[in-house]
């Protein structure tokens, strides 16, 4: 176990494990019988090339990146920790760029890079509760990013009928292959340029509630089709 842990911290180990992670997630994603729930016009998101800040909870990272549109440049924010580096390799196989940084390490530099990418018309993918939680609690960074760049936030939510929950800080979700799945993009959420601290907190809470609301709708829809 120690040898494997050490291997995962090496560049070669991260590349190998990252490819395996990508390959497994791709196979499972393709095996799932997906339904799209029309919360926001899918065609608009998939047909246009507008810049967006896509977000999903950290515990839905297993398949979230596979559901993003491929018709634009997407830059994914990832931690520079070994786990984040492994996920970064998988993102690169999906054709996404990676920006390394977190609230604890390289946060400001990563934030500036995201601002620059959005100014260039590129999109961002971010887990608003990552990399270490608290679980399903939106942090301020995504709100600040949307405010500064006048870029809409698009929540991404998915659920499968059969899955396993890992005993981790975020209760990471592992979907079973060949299960029935459903996903949805939420309505664009814009943050005003000039808002006071109370409105700022309200916007943060609104995003949090919207992701949770969409999740409940999808889970309810899956249950009704049992």
Image (cartoon, rainbow, N blue to C red):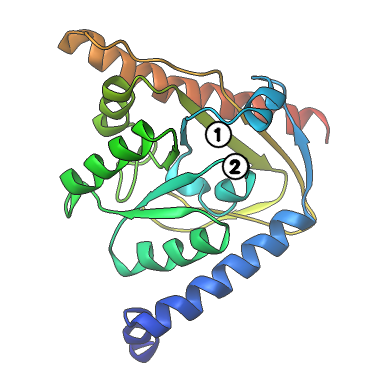
Quote the CA–CA distance across marks 1 and 2. Answer: 8 Å
From this view, report whether residue 105 is shown above or below residue 42. below
Residue at horizontal 35%, vertical 80%? 11
Number of marks present in the image shown: 2
From this view, report whether residue 69 is shown above or below residue 145. below
Q: Position of residue 214 (x, y in %)?
A: 57, 24
Nearer to us in this view, 71 or 21: 71
**Image quadrant containing the C terminus:** top right
Q: What is the number of the mark on residue 156?
A: 1
Q: What is the number of the mark on residue 111?
A: none
Nearer to us in this view, 83 or 41: 41
Q: Is residue 185 left or right of residue 151?
A: right
From this view, report whether residue 216 is shown above or below residue 105. above
Q: Is residue 223 left or right of residue 142?
A: right
Q: Position of residue 219 (x, y in %)?
A: 66, 32
The reply to whether the C-beta atoms of the residues labelled 1 and 2 are less than 8 Å apart is yes
Q: What is the number of the mark on residue 68?
A: 2
Q: Quadrant of residue 160?
A: top right
Q: Quadrant of residue 145?
A: top left
Mark 2 is surrounded, within 10 Å at the Cα level, by few (under 14), some (14 to 19) or many (20 or more) other residues, namely some
Mark 1 is surrounded, within 10 Å at the Cα level, by few (under 14), some (14 to 19) or many (20 or more) other residues, namely many
Asked which secondary structure carries label 2, the reply is loop
Q: Position of residue 194 (x, y in %)?
A: 21, 8
Residue at horizontal 31%, vertical 10%? 192
**Badge 1 or badge 2: first in the primary sequence:** 2
């Amino acid at each position: 176990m120690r040898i494997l842990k050490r291997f995962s911290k090496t560049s070669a180990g991260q590349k190998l494990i990252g490819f395996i992670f990508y390959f497994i997630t791709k196979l499972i994603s393709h095996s799932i019988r997906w339904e799209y729930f029309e919360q926001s016009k899918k065609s608009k998101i998939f047909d246009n090339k507008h810049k967006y800040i896509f977000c999903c909870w950290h515990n839905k990272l297993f398949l979230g990146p596979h559901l993003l549109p491929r018709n634009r440049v997407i830059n994914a924010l990832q931690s520079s920790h070994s786990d984040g580096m492994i996920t970064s390799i998988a993102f690169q196989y999906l054709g996404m760029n990676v920006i390394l940084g977190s609230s604890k390490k390289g946060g400001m530099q990563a934030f500036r890079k995201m601002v620059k990418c959005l100014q260039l018309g590129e999109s961002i993918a971010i887990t608003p509760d990552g990399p270490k939680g608290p679980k399903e609690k939106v942090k301020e960074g995504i709100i600040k990013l949307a405010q500064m760049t006048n870029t809409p936030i698009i929540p991404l939510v998915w659920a499968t009928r059969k899955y396993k929950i890992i005993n981790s800080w975020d209760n990471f979700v592992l979907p079973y292959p060949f299960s029935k799945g459903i996903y949805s993009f939420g309505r664009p959420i814009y943050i005003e340029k000039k808002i006071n601290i109370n409105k700022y907190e309200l916007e943060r809470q609104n995003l949090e509630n919207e992701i949770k609301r969409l999740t409940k709708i999808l889970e309810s829809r899956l249950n009704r089709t049992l």
